[in-house]
Amino acid sequence: MQKEYKAYTLQTFKKIPQVQKLPEEILFSIEAVGKVYPFRVNNYVIDELIDWDNVPDDPCFRMTFPQKDMLTPTNYDEIASVTGGGSSQEDIKDRLKEIYLALNPHPAGQLEENVPLLDGNRLEGVQHKYNETILVFPSQGQTCHAYCSFCFRWPQFVGIDSLKFSMRRVDPLIQYLRQHPEVSDVLFTGGDPLVMKTKVFASYIDAILDADFPHLKTIRIGTKALSYWPYRFLTDADADDLLRLFAKIAEKGKHLAFMANFNHPQELKTDAVRKAIARIRDTGAEIRTQSPLLANINDEARIWADMWAEQVTLGCIPYYMFIVRDTGAQHYFGVPLAKAWDIFRGAYQNISGLARTARGPIMSTTYGKVQVLGINELQGAKVFVLQFLQARDPSWVLRPFFADYDANAIWLDELEPFGEKSFFFESKPV
């Protein structure tokens, strides 16, 4: 029997029975902050993930419902003043655009550095930052089953076309892959590519498989569907078709890496998600798990140890602990690098070797993925020990470097190089 899907947005969230019992102050803040950050939630999250007796502290509530402190006091007061009032829509849009642009909507050079060229023209809907991997943003996948309140891709959903990545035709992608034999991995992302009907998603996958590129080894799918709508793999009308598509990838000799976003152990406890994980693994796909480290949601070593251990039990492979990106509500969700390292180390000390496939804490910076290896003492001074796990220049990978210790720093650009005027990579062209 198909599970009925019901989504709620900013215009309809007050119709949720559980929400109707919340204090008026919380309802108002959801409405106000929801004008800035996109809001969408569905009945699975509402009924099976959120513990409404623990709201507003419940982690799954905070992951999906906008929180007042996600805006600075100045921005909140500005938006609150036009919420429920008589301001024109044009006036509100103008104010919102100013706020969006101040929130660093595209960090790490996504617009300036990552968009490749095809025959001298920008290849829209694709990012190519690292030699081996390209990211593809299908236009039909530019929404999600529910929106994460911390999502670094929030610009995809706020209705400003100039901030979006979106691919409308698959032919240019095939042409680009033909011209770039260094690419071994294609990562479908969004939004969430698994909001697409299987028939639509298959048009992208089949085109790649039919091209039969010998250099292409792996197809990745970055998705939150397992966490926010596991019925996509169980009872949706085309669920079986989707699983057959996954199996087809393996049959064609390609590896399918299912990149699942789990942010809290609570998301792993339902019968639906456990059954969905088993069905996906039966197709030959490997499920790798990743999450940002989030203040107010999962910033405890015990939470990560429990989450990684449960993922291994279910047959998933812990992959990355990310530092929350320097965009959007970083001031609310950000965790200092020193604390992040303590959390990662504390979690590692309490898991088996099978869960120690997880790597972190990691910042996805303009230059590449920078891992905090630890905190040590060098020449009598306390320092961060860092390295690139992935970089625009492959020669930087696994080259240790040092930064002055700063207990409050939450991103690379807040660090000072130890004993040098600049980091070795800052003098290189990006």
Image (spheres, rainbow, N blue to C red):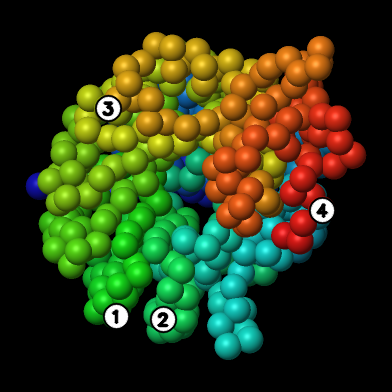
The relative height of residue 286 versus residue 361 in the rendered view (above or below) is: below
Question: Which of these two is toward me, 254 or 18?
Answer: 254
Q: Residue type at mark 2? A: Arg
* Mark 3: few/some/many CA within 10 Å (<14, 14-19, 20+): some
Residue 404 falls in image quadrant: top right
Q: Is residue 218 left or right of residue 359?
A: left
Evaluate if marks 4 and 2 touch, with contact meaning CB atoms under 8 Å apart: no
Amino acid tagged 1: Ala
Q: CA distance from mark 4 to mark 3?
A: 41 Å
Which secondary structure lies at badge 4? loop
Q: Residue at x 26, y 73 (%)?
A: 209
Mark 2 or mark 3: whose residue is earlier in sequence? 2
Q: Earlier in the sequence, mark 2 or mark 1?
A: 2
Q: Nearer the viewer, mark 4 or mark 2?
A: 4
Name the outermost residue toward the left: 1
Q: Farthest front residue? A: 379
Q: Is residue 369 left or right of residue 251?
A: right
The location of residue 283, given as percent across then percent down, is 15, 51
Helix, strand or loop at label 2? It is helix
Task: Identify the residue under disc 2.
Answer: 178
- Circles 2 and 1: CB distance less than 8 Å? yes
Could you tell me the amino acid type at mark 3? Val
Which of the marked residues, 3 or 1, is nearer the chain's N terminus? 1
Q: CA distance from mark 2 to mark 3?
A: 37 Å
Residue 156 horizontal/vertical position (percent): 57, 59
Q: Which label is found at residue 211?
A: 1
Q: Is residue 321 above or below residue 8?
A: above
Q: CA distance from mark 4 to mark 2?
A: 33 Å
The residue singled out by tag 4 in the image is 427
**Residue drawn at point x = 52 percent, y = 63 percent:** 131
- Mark 4 and mark 1: span between their CA atoms? 40 Å
